[in-house]
Amino acid sequence: MPHLLVVDDTKSARVLALGLLRKAGVADLLEATDGVEALAAVEANEVAVVVTDIQMPEMDGYELVTAMRNTRPDVPVVLMTARGSEAAAVRALQAGAASYVPKDALARDLVPTLERVLGAAHSELERKRLMSQLEFTESRFHLENDPAMLLAAVGHLRDELESLDLWPAADLVRFSMALQEALFNAYYHGNLQVRDEVAEYDPQAFHEVAEKRRTESPYTERRIHVGVRCTPEEAVYVIADDGNGFDHAALPDPDDPAEMESAGGRGIRLMRTFLDDVRFNEAGNKVTLVVRRKS
């Protein structure tokens, strides 16, 4: 059964917190005197939640929260705050602590706060269990030529991928960068037909041409079409534009390090580096991006 860990360098404070929890019927309790002992206890035991003081020797509450965030982000941390530790508590909350309880209100607030935190953690576990039984999801978007809309789509699809647990959280930025490159290639080079050569010699002119064409026919009627299909093992993104396409085979080899400084092919290089598969249609106005589960 998971344990609840109380961390405080002051024995009387630990006794008070542990007594309140035992009175509430919590039987599986552990204690530690600082963050170093707490990390060892978490490593050696199945811990459901950590309740910690802020100001402690060796490793304080802020440092403990930061370490837990890096090593055990699945275990929530609740702070016990005393007068004079408010600034450190704010830093710890910003670093990832789940909640806090003022020490002078432990008798009133400790147990209800832990119930809420454990309830939220349980809901997250159930969500993951639910997603593990997902068969597939499909969605389709027809996006206007609007950079803000494209960035919103990147954020939405990143969150969806995170919910599927296909990739580690640390790799989601790479996914976002690859998807952003694909969408903005469809926007600038596909629908608006603005070429890299303009940006290479005059970046300001590049964006001025794009802004002008957004309001002109035939560019303003064009859309970016995004189809998404997700399963427990992979996510497939098909991004198409209404432009004339391009000869992607004529681009510099994106896998050749010597071509890193070339104007063309940067987006394709990032997509091929970050994603599991990248395929263009013959016309060059549709790209299929594949993300496969990482073990």
Image (tube, rainbow, N blue to C red):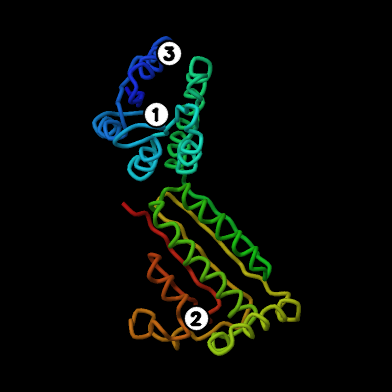
Say above or below: 236 vs 185.
above
Residue 193 lies in quadrant: bottom right
How far apart are the alpha carbons under marks 3 and 1? 15 Å
Q: Tag 2 or tag 1, which sits nearer the N-term? A: 1
Along the horizontal axis of the image, is 243 left or right of 246?
Answer: right
Image location (x, y in percent) of residue 279: 44, 73
How far apart are the alpha carbons under marks 1 and 2? 59 Å
Along the horizontal axis of the image, is 139 left or right of 1?
Answer: right
> Which residue corresponds to mark 1?
52
Which image quarter is the N terminus in? top left
Residue 214 lies in quadrant: bottom right
Crowding at dot 2, Cα within 10 Å, few <14 / some 14-19 / many 20+, comes out as: few
**In the foreground, 292 or 78:** 78
Image location (x, y in percent) of residue 99: 50, 32
Crowding at dot 1, Cα within 10 Å, few <14 / some 14-19 / many 20+, comes out as: many
Q: Which residue is drawn at 53% across and 16% down?
A: 108
Count the marks: 3
> Which residue corresponds to mark 3?
20
Q: Nearer the viewer, mark 1 or mark 2?
A: 1
Crowding at dot 3, Cα within 10 Å, few <14 / some 14-19 / many 20+, comes out as: some
Helix, strand or loop at label 3? It is helix
Q: Which residue is drawn at 46% across and 32% down?
A: 121
Helix, strand or loop at label 1? It is strand
Helix, strand or loop at label 2? It is loop
Say above or below: 54 vs 252.
above
* Farthest-out residue, top: 23
Disc 1 to disc 2: CB gap under 8 Å: no
Q: Which residue is drawn at 61% across and 67% down?
A: 225
> Which residue corresponds to mark 2?
282
* Farthest-out residue, front: 84
How far apart are the alpha carbons under marks 2 and 3? 69 Å
